[in-house]
Amino acid sequence: MNILKNFKNKIFLKDTIISLAIIFFVFALDRVTKINIINHQLNNSILFINDYLNLELVWNTGIGFGLFSQNANIYYHSISLLIFFVIVFLSYLISKANFADKIFFALILGGALGNFYDRLLYFAVPDFIDFHINDFHWFTFNIADIFITVGIILIISKDLILNKK
């Protein structure tokens, strides 16, 4: 019985270290890209990458993709508090999830921490990736948003595939 408990503890420790590494990687990559775009665009220049992609700094006070952006402090603080509780809940889910779900939740948590950090530091989230076709522009987003979206898509996809069986 003691051997089985030690084995489970080692697996839990390995899974936790991998999850923390993913969270740190996502957070660090997000921070580096945001710092670089903020420093580059202090002179208000837009980086034209190609006909479909620009890098242009936009400050977002709402949630992902600029949704619920409001000037009122009550909205901003309410959204920030909600994001904090989501971060706490994701941390709990990571502690209880199987390995695959830990990875998916870690992607989401790393991105959420990146955006939450910006909300605390700047009182807004710097978004800068602007995909467009002619005059149609998708919501401007950042690296954290990409990881949050990928994590959510992976969780939903996994659940849909497993529920089919």
Image: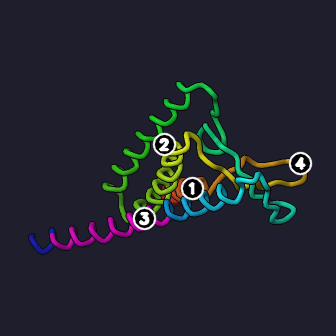
Viewer-closest of 120 and 109: 120
Q: Residue furthest right?
A: 134
Type of amino acid at the residue the image marks with label 3: Ala
- Please give the residue where the numbered disc 2 appears in the rendered image: 120
Residue 147 x, y percent position in the rendering: 56, 58
Marks 1 and 3 sit apart, C-alpha to C-alpha, by: 20 Å
Residue range in magenta is 6-25
Viewer-closest of 8 and 25: 25
Which quadrant of the rendered structure holds the N terminus? bottom left
Locate residue 145 relative to residue 80 in the image: left or right: right
- Within 10 angstroms of label 3, few (less than 14), some, or many (20 or more) residues? some
Type of amino acid at the residue the image marks with label 1: Ala
- Please give the residue where the numbered disc 1 appears in the rendered image: 144
Mark 2 / mark 4, whichever is N-terminal: 2
Q: Say which mark, if any, is on residue 135.
A: 4
Residue 80 x, y percent position in the rendering: 49, 37
Is residue 157 visible to the viewer in this orientation of the structure? no
**Vertical placement of 89 versus 34: above or below?**
above
Q: Say which mark, if any, is on residue 38.
A: none
- Please give the residue where the numbered disc 3 appears in the rendered image: 100
Q: Which picture quadrant has residue 149?
A: bottom right
